[in-house]
Image (tube, grey):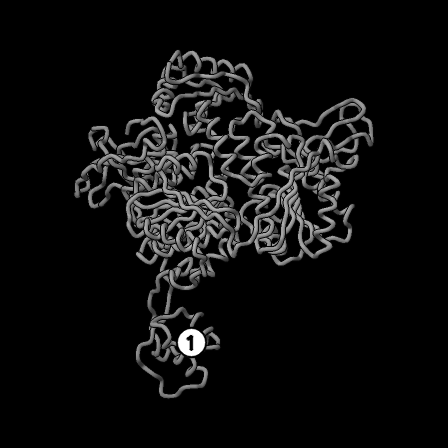
């Protein structure tokens, strides 16, 4: 496959190549390793494989799973090739998925084997799940029946076959009663298929009571599903407008037609509320796919997705690589969320790849958000995406009244971080029996600890970052590599006791301030690294939704679609935090985050407000938030991006070179710059030391490549890598097409 210039220019698939119905003597097999191409293997006599078959092959001294691939082999004599060891009894990876793997590898400049690895995440599922021993009625009925045996026979008419324990439970007897009837010939042993990991959703189970605007939006999405064929639609609606219930109607249409649906969520471990809403609408939960799932459940989901038994999956970005044979719709919820970008091994953006998979598969994709990404907004304005809007909240609930609090004029008291204006608003809110949310996108107690005597600052030994004070755990921790030390009592440099000072606030410090100021208020702290993990977090979120908290302090996870009925005040503690770096998306992300978090207030119709503490009230982002005019922000940001040639009007790619020593990293980065030469279409910036210059003990240099939307970025980077010296020693090179992070 050849490189095309931009993402949308990649969305026109090549014609499918005809394949022979006969298994060849030699086949290419793509193994889940960083290989640039499939390897050739001989097919043993009697083994039947085809493109997409999952097989086991020898690779060096070990056996690995791989996928029989399309295309030609090396032309080597089959007698000189190692044979396939085993063909798994597994549904094939269909042509659409194979093309998607090739596409992702081509676009991201990743080895196809590493992309294929994401589709082979559950090796224990390659063989069928074992059957369950069950019982079925024979038609014989013993002459003498006890009451317990009669209950078993009566219960058995409700289904053609039962498990032994299930039948005993249904009849309210012990399993020994069932065993007795088996001995008397009333039941015979049968094999039952493994139980489904989730029940099938019922599209007609619990239809929502939609408003006129919601119904019009839902009908538009349903029409796209029923028409079939590829389309991408941006579903944009203010917070609380009912976007989820609207796209559920499209989901219902897809499953009613027998198709499968994938719903991508940015934080699946934090979205039990979404699972509950889906269950209420469809009578059954979706299958889940994320890193918190037990391995055995992941295997069952993978297998039953491949067999077409699971109709709906709600999952994190890796769910894109599940082997759906009948995928008919992809929904990307909170499509703007940066969590959709994967930044390890294969660098890809799940939102963009979801659109690609829909294009290659010929079915619709829906991107939903209250604060769409600039890219999606521009694509919708240009007509490449459909655009469905929900302008008002459900049941005509009012949006919160927003106000900027200028910290230069209304500073907090010494040693405090909540301004007097916000303090008064919190007191008024909890006095009415309502809830206040304080948002600060900074974990821990304080971002920096230093000695007031000698000025020593506590820094990570493996990264060029300060250690964050986590006072609740008694640790200083690095948020990049995980390094931690016990919080010391004295300075390690000068040895002075009681002179270590925490600088700046984290959410723990704001919680401490609230507990000191409002000792009788019920205060809950929410952070992704809190003790107890996702389960405790879900309990805390449920408690807030049930009104069991007065003050909630949280990081960005509180902005992710939660519904808190009694929340009427939102205070942003340090709203300028995201604007203080050189990220070209800083303004966009700050706007999205503040808009989302203030949207937690007033969702049930209660009068609500948002107070945004800032040292830059004149900043365009702050002005756009305060005015409530999202269009004002988007128009300005889009114009600036176009003027600067930044995405989506231009293309960016980055190369990060890392090594055990600074010299190794810098030398190789300079060699890459030399190999790039001069090109009118693409400008090469750098190399420069990365803002995060040392990460996990490795020194880092960055090169940034910028070109027009039509510039041949992938071809250019391939030529650079080919012309540059091969990495030696400890040097590693990472390529990121369309980078989201600039650290």
Please indicate, yes or no, whether residue 281 appears anywhere in the rendered image: yes
Q: Position of residue 636 (x, y in %)?
A: 50, 30
Residue lying farthest to the right in this orientation: 497
Q: Is residue 63 visible?
A: no
At x 78% / y 30%, what residue is drawn? 500
Q: For residue 725, which quarter of the picture?
A: top left
Residue 721: % across, % down: 39, 19
Residue 248, by quadrant, is: bottom left
Disc 1 crowd, CA 10 A, few/some/many (<14, 14-19, 20+): many
Instruction: Please indicate whether residue 741 sits to the left or right of residue 567 in the image.
Output: left
In the displayed structure, 54 sits above or below 709; it is below
Q: Is residue 729 left or right of residue 251?
A: right
Q: Secondary structure at mark 1?
A: helix
Q: Along the horizontal axis of the image, is 271 left or right of 720?
A: right
Q: Residue at x 79, y 34 (%)?
A: 414
- Residue where numbered disc 1 is placed: 178
Residue at image coords 76%, 49%: 518
Residue drawn 40% across and 86% down?
A: 145
Q: Please state the horizontal and vertical placement of residue 234, each as a whole percent of the image.
A: 41, 43
Task: Assign the N terminus to one quadrant of the image.
Answer: top left
């Amino acid at each position: 496959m050849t490189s095309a210039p931009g993402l949308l220019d990649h969305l026109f698939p090549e014609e499918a190549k005809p394949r022979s119905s006969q298994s060849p003597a030699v086949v290419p097999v793509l193994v889940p390793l960083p290989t640039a191409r499939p390897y050739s293997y001989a097919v043993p006599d009697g083994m039947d494989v085809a493109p997409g078959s999952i097989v086991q092959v020898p690779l060096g001294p070990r056996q690995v799973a791989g996928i029989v691939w399309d295309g030609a082999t090396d032309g080597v004599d089959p007698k000189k090739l190692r044979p396939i060891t085993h063909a798994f009894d597994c549904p094939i990876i269909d042509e659409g998925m194979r093309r998607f793997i090739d596409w992702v590898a081509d676009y991201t400049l990743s080895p196809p084997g590493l992309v294929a690895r994401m589709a082979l995440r559950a090796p224990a599922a390659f063989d069928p799940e074992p059957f369950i021993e069950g019982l079925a009625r024979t038609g014989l009925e013993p002459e003498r029946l006890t009451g317990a045996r009669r209950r078993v026979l009566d219960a058995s008419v409700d289904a053609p076959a039962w498990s032994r324990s299930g039948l005993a439970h249904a009849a309210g007897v012990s399993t020994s009663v069932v065993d007795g009837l088996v001995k008397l010939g009333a039941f015979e042993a049968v094999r039952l298929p493994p139980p489904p990991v989730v029940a099938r959703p019922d599209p007609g189970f619990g239809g929502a009571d939609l408003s006129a605007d919601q119904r019009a939006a839902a009908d538009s999405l349903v029409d796209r599903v029923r028409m079939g064929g590829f389309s991408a639609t941006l579903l944009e609606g203010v917070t609380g407008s009912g976007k989820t219930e609207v796209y559920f109607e499209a989901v219902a249409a897809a499953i009613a037609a027998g198709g499968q649906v994938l719903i991508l969520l940015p934080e699946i471990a934090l979205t039990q509320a979404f699972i509950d809403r889906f269950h209420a609408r469809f009578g059954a939960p979706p299958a889940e796919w994320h890193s918190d799932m037990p391995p055995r459940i992941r295997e069952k989901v993978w297998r039953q997705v491949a067999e077409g038994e699971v109709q709906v999956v709600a999952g994190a970005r890796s769910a894109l690589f599940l082997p759906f044979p009948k995928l008919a719709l992809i929904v990307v919820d909170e499509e703007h969320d940066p969590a959709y970008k994967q930044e390890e091994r294969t660098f890809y953006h799940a939102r963009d790849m979801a659109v690609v998979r829909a294009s290659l598969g010929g079915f619709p994709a829906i991107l939903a958000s209250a604060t769409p990404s600039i890219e999606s907004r521009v694509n919708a304005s240009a007509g490449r995406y459909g655009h469905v809007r929900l302008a008002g909240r459900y049941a005509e609930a009012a949006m919160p009244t927003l106000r900027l609090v200028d910290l230069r004029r209304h500073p907090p008291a010494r040693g405090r971080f909540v301004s007097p204006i916000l303090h008064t608003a919190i007191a008024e809110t909890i006095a009415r029996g309502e809830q206040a949310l304080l948002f600060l996108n900074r974990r821990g107690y304080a971002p920096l600890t230093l000695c007031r005597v000698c000025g020593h600052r506590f820094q990570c030994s493996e990264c060029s970052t300060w250690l964050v004070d986590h006072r609740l755990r008694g640790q200083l921790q690095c948020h990049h590599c995980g390094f931690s030390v016990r919080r010391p009592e004295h300075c390690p440099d000068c040895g002075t006791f009681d002179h270590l000072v925490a600088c700046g606030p984290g959410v723990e410090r704001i919680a401490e301030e609230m507990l000191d100021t409002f000792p009788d208020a019920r205060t809950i702290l929410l952070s992704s690294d809190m003790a107890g993990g996702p389960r405790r977090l879900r309990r805390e979120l449920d408690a807030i939704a049930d009104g069991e908290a007065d003050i909630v302090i949280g990081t960005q996870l509180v902005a992710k679609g939660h519904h808190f009925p009694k929340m009427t005040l939102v205070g942003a503690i340090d709203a300028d935090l995201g604007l203080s770096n050189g990220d070209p998306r800083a303004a966009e992300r700050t706007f999205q985050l503040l808009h989302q978090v203030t949207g937690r207030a007033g969702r049930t119709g209660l009068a609500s407000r948002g107070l945004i503490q800032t040292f830059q009230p004149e900043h365009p982002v702050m002005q756009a938030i305060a005015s409530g005019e999202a269009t004002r922000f988007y128009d300005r940001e889009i114009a600036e991006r176009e003027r600067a040639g930044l995405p989506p009007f231009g293309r960016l790619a980055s190369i990060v070179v890392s090594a055990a020593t600074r010299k190794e990293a810098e030398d190789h980065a300079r060699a890459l710059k030399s190999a790039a030469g001069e090109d009118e279409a693409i400008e090469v910036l750098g190399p420069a030391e990365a803002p995060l210059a040392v990460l996990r003990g490795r020194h880092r240099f960055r090169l940034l490549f910028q070109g027009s939307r039509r510039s041949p970025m992938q071809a250019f980077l391939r030529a650079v890598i080919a012309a540059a010296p091969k990495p030696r020693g400890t040097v590693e090179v990472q390529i990121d097409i369309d980078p989201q992070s600039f650290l």
